[in-house]
Amino acid sequence: FIWAFPICLIFQTVMALQWGELVSQYPITGGIYQWAKYLGGEWWGWLTAVFYTACVVIIQPILGVIVNVVLSGLFPSIAFSTTNSIIIAIILTLIAGIVISSSVRLAGLLNGVGVVLELFVLFAATILLLFHTKQPVGVVFHSAGVQGHGSYLVPFIVALALELTLLTGFESAGFFSEEVRKSRSDGPRAILFACIGTAVFTGLFAFAMLLATPNIHAGMESEAGWVPQTLHAALGTAGEDTILAAALVALVSTAIANMGAMTRLSFGMSRDG
């Protein structure tokens, strides 16, 4: 999982540079739909938009699952289950819809607060976790038996897929081009900073979490409970709750950004008939 981070960062940075160039050339509402349309024609733009919309639709309930993990850590009475994840995903989508339908300024403000809070808490938590290490740095050179009786390639691909999912969404900054001042310069800058910043902060946090895990095998067996348990063991109840609360704010802002990107994509397509 740790070694997959630099691999993902390299490939996603190449993507971010491409998206940034496209935003500077075509600062039009609709983002990836517009870019594909101007590069490959209307049919290709439409097909790209359909697939992108499907991806955003899938991401929304995934956020519900992650929020369920966070809430179960904050409030033990909220169990981590499929039913609760579905309910949370619906509530999260409704909140995002209400915010997006209000004003661009409010959505931008909430997203800005969410991002700043997330980065600050991630950085602070990383520093604190590094003072509570339970594993040697050499743990990153051991598989801990995660491959079972099969190939190590399978869990590596799973980790790669998880991190690629984590390091996406930076292109959504280009979806709001017509509503942003200096979109030809600020759009590309936002895309690049979002990609690299997310990778650096989350990568360091994951590394610190691994070193602070009291028992690697027990952490693997606890599945969704690994993060809250490790935070609690290292930072206590107050530290764990603070980090989880910040993560909750960040996830809500992510849901708002997803909803915003989807509405701008739909608008861009409908405007072209």
Image (cartoon, rainbow, N blue to C red):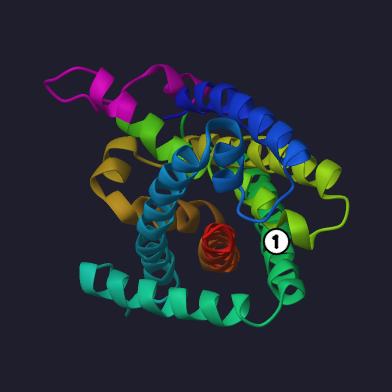
Residue interval drawn in magenta: 136-157
* Count of number-bearing discs: 1
- Identify the residue at the far left of this view: 149
Query: Looking at the picture, how far across and down is residue 3, in whole percent?
Result: 47, 22
> Is 73 placed above or below 15 here?
below
- The answer to whether one can see residue 242 in this image is no
Per the image, is 148 magenta? yes
Foreground pick, 25 / 88: 25
Foreground pick, 239 / 16: 16
Q: Quadrant of the N terminus?
A: top left
Q: Write the residue at 59% across / 62% down.
A: 271
Amino acid found under the numbered disc labelled 1: Leu
> Is 138 placed above or below 61 here?
above
Foreground pick, 236 / 90: 90
Q: Write the residue at 74% across / 54% down.
A: 177
Query: Looking at the picture, how far across and down is residue 106, in whole percent?
Result: 73, 76
| Residue 3 shown left or right of residue 147 in the figure | right
Query: Looking at the picture, how far across and down is residue 198, in whole percent?
Result: 62, 42
Q: Badge 1, how many Cα within 10 Å: few under 14, some, many 20+? A: some
Q: Quadrant of residue 111?
A: bottom right
Q: Which residue is mark 1?
A: 117
